Image (tube, rainbow, N blue to C red):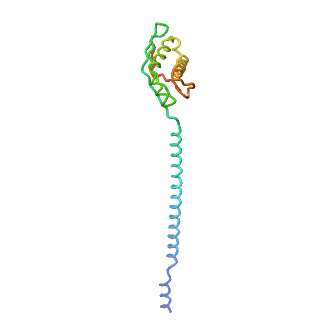
Amino acid sequence: MAKDAAPEEATAPPPKKKKLLLIIIIAAVVVVLAGTGAAVLLLSGKPAAEQQAEGEEEAAEEEEVVIYEKLETFTVNLADQESMLQVEITLKLASPEVQGKIKQRMPEVRDGLLRLLSSKTAEELATLEGKEELAGSVQKEINALIGAKKAAQGIQGVLFTSFIMQ
């Protein structure tokens, strides 16, 4: 009988191997599920980022393109006859059409600005308020010359890129 018991023990796997096999299968399932979950998270986040980037590109395209026109340097004697002004002006324009109008009428633009600048005194231009008032006057002068009724249709801003008084 002892001989009969030995073959039965040899055919039946030991209980330790069953537990080890079960642990390996469970671990493999957990790894597969974790990998699948991570892949889903990463892939679902990518289209959202791409959609956000596309939305930002569309918003940038919808924004107006800023057009600048730099004028030649102006050097004038000021109205007080004791001071000189040298100024570089850059105009912020509403559209390429406005840029074309300014270039077409540049002699009139320069003449109007020379007259305007030479009518000011050093005392008027020495303050920030004086410079802001001058910028507003330049804007009105040029918009009147090119026939723009509103700033949104013509010169939107006047920038002094250099402003020297002596």
Count the labels in the image.
0
Q: Nearer the viewer, residue 117 or 43?
A: 117
**Residue 161 at x, y = what percent?**
46, 23
Q: Nearer the viewer, residue 163 or 144?
A: 144
Seen in the picture, residue 10 relative to 66 is either above or below; the reply is below
**Residue 65 at x, y = what percent?**
49, 34
Seen in the picture, residue 86 relative to 14 is either above or below; the reply is above
Q: Residue at x 45, y 21 (%)?
A: 106
**Residue 86 at x, y = what percent?**
44, 16
Q: Residue furthest right?
A: 150
Q: Nearer the viewer, residue 12 or 80?
A: 80
In the picture, which quadrant includes the C terminus?
top left
Q: Residue at x 45, y 10 (%)?
A: 77
Seen in the picture, residue 3 relative to 78 is either above or below; the reply is below
Q: Residue at x 50, y 87 (%)?
A: 8
Task: Give residue 72's quadrant in the image.
Answer: top left
Q: Residue furthest bottom?
A: 1
**Residue 44 at x, y = what percent?**
53, 55
